[in-house]
Amino acid sequence: QLQLVESGGGLVQPGGSLRLSCAASGWTLEYYAIGWFRRAPGKEREGVSCISMRDGSTWYSDSVKGRFTISGDNAKSTVYLQMDSLKPEDSDVYYCVRGDYCSGRVSPFLYNMDSWGKGTLVTVSS
């Protein structure tokens, strides 16, 4: 059964760090691209980052560039999003999503998205 499961969210103070994980099961990670997007209730989906598991190329939105780092481990079938220097405006539900290719632009940030997880909540607050 094809599955993506996010974990690692939580409450952190401004300036702090979190590492999100996206565990894939039921399929081979290395043939796809994986993206992270965030969406708060009532807001538009915002692509945050993307990684091609074929060649390791990455993309970041301007809002997180220099603060977030995406990486992947094909052997563990897991993609990570290291989030540093977190700001209150980073508070959101974060989802990982499977697609074919990172587009290198804001929208769509990932082509042919076909599966995503249930999300993990990140709250940045003092």
Image (tube, rainbow, N blue to C red):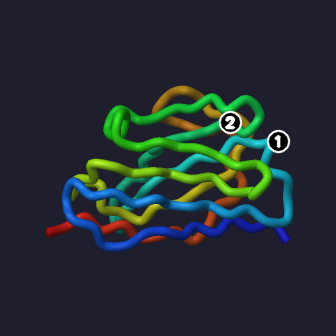
Considering the numbered disc 1 on the image, is that residue within a helix, a strand or a loop? helix
Please tell me which residue lies in front, 109 or 126.
126
53 in relation to 90, above or below: above
Could you say which quadrant of the image residue 61 lies in? top left
Q: Nearer the viewer, residue 17 or 90?
A: 17
Percent coordinates x, y for residue 50 in the rendering = 57, 40
Q: Residue at x 77, y 34 (%)?
A: 54
> Is 6 rendered above or below residue 44?
below
Identify the secondary structure beneath mark 2: strand
Question: How many other residues sit within 10 Å of disc 1, few (<14), some (14-19) or many (≥20)?
Answer: some
* Number of the label disc, if any, that sits on residue 16: none
Residue 110's image quarter? top right
* Picture mark count: 2
Q: Quadrant of the image for the N terminus?
A: bottom right
Within the image, what quadrant is residue 64 found in? top left
Image position, residue 46 (x, y; %): 42, 47
On-image quarter of the C terminus: bottom left
Measure how far apart labels 1 and 2 are at the Cα level.
Answer: 8 Å
Residue type, mark 2 in image: Ser
* Front one among 5 and 41: 5
The residue beneath circle 1 is 31
